Image (tube, rainbow, N blue to C red):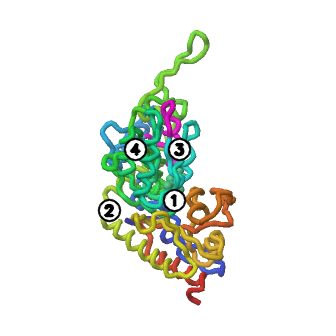
Amino acid sequence: MPVLGLDVTVPLADGRRLQYAALDQAASAPVLRQVWDEVAEYVPFYGSVHRGAGHLSRLSTELFEDARESVARFLDCREDDQVVFTRATTDSLNLLASALPEGCRVYVFETEHHAALLPWRGAEVTFLDAPASPAEAVARLREALAAREDDGPALVCVTGASNVTGELWPVRELAAAAHAHGARIVLDAAQLAPHRPVSVRELDVDWVAFSGHKLYAPFGAGVLAGRTDWLDAAEPYLAGGGASRRVLRREDGGLDVEWHTGPARHEAGSPNVVGVHALASACRALAEADLAVLAAREEALLGRLREGLAALPRVRVLSLFGDQAPRVGVVSFVVDGLDGADVAEHLAASHGIGVRAGLFCAHPLVRRLLGEGPDAAAECGAGGASPLDAVRASFGVGTPVEHVDRLLGALAELTGATS
Ligand code: PMP
């Protein structure tokens, strides 16, 4: 699948220019050509959705609503599920957190990305310790749910693929465990959806969240898809135009507001039609692709990278499940005696390679994998790299094998494996 950006060259510290090796696709993936072409075709004609009667407004409304259908098909949603457009996964999970029923208890593994770990502020949250295997994850969840003292509403939030180790989580089994104990489950598919088909029906999850910018569409749009009941019963996530059906001034001077039900309830304001169109276009492109071919290609690149890293003397790959789980193209590692931020800096300046250093917005997990104490200082994002950073290399559908080989060559040089 052709992606854009492979011909970008970057300056190196020694003055040469080199084709950029984008190995940070777990953060944001480059755009698919097909997505870019569809977006470029639409941009000259965009207009405000849902309100205007003019031709362009109708065109945008149609595209916006078609996008919901593309996403629903991409996720193999149930008939009565709804697709709400958000800004990204973080926004989607915060939206769901704002829609929890009264007294809802939330269960989340400490290994989650902060977007899944932190939004449940108003709820009673049980944080589950990192499991050592997929089977232990299921057992641990079962045990926690069985210890529930009431039969009130409960939600489990789980990742499909780790943004740190790339390891796949046993989502279907976790969903079965949740449902057996009367709980619902939301799948954080931010890292899973770009690499594997996600079927709401097959996995039997209640909601799915993912981001367009990790799925080969440019920034700005995300999805929360799934059950309608909690979302329709909740206060609108954003209050404003589009979410309100009727607003009346009361005799006492206040306002009576009747809110929409359905996706519009949580999508107040003028929506990001271009972002949503791009996201839906990426969903269509992936749905049409030969997934077996893509998976085999990814498997080959991943095997090459992992074997290469294993052969390097001072490199340790981070893993929670060892050989007990399949993985997507996301690999984190540390280089003994070297700070991850320095490694990443060197790879960029001397080899034109873009990787990420840090704790990857999953501090409890990465600290555990690094064997650190809980009070090690670290910040997420905004250049806040801790002295104990790991390095993450991640790739996607357009990654050439040369980029993986260049990374391995650079690390071999750095670790003294070659001189
Ligand atoms: N969950 C996972 C597993 C992620 O990798 C990320 C992004 N790194 C997020 C959630 C948050 O996604 P976004 O930044 O697009 O909101």
**Which is more foreground, mark 3 or mark 1?**
3
Q: Residues within 10 Å of mark 4 (few under 14, many from 20)?
A: many
Q: Distance between the residues labelled 4 and 3?
A: 14 Å
Q: Which mark is residue 323?
A: none
**Which is more foreground, mark 4 or mark 2?**
4
Q: Is residue 299 magenta?
A: no
**Which residues lie in the magenta part?**
84-105
Q: How far apart are marks 1 and 2 (CA)?
A: 20 Å
Is residue 276 in view?
Answer: no
**Residue kind at label 2, given as amino acid type:** Leu
| Residue wearing tag 4 | 178
| Residue wearing tag 3 | 126
| Secondary element at image label 3 | strand
* Image coordinates for residue 165, horizontal then vertical, percent: 49, 64
**Residue kind at label 4, given as amino acid type:** Ala
| Residue wearing tag 2 | 291
**Residue kind at label 1, given as amino acid type:** Ser
Q: Which of marks 3 and 1 is nearer the N terminus?
A: 1
Residue that lies at the very extreme toward the bottom in this rendered image: 419
Q: In which quarter of the image is residue 321?
A: bottom left
Q: Is residue 104 magenta?
A: yes
| Residue wearing tag 1 | 28
Q: Distance between the residues labelled 3 and 1?
A: 30 Å
Residue located 60% across and 73% down the image: 348
Q: Is 25 left or right of 171, judged from the image as shown?
A: right
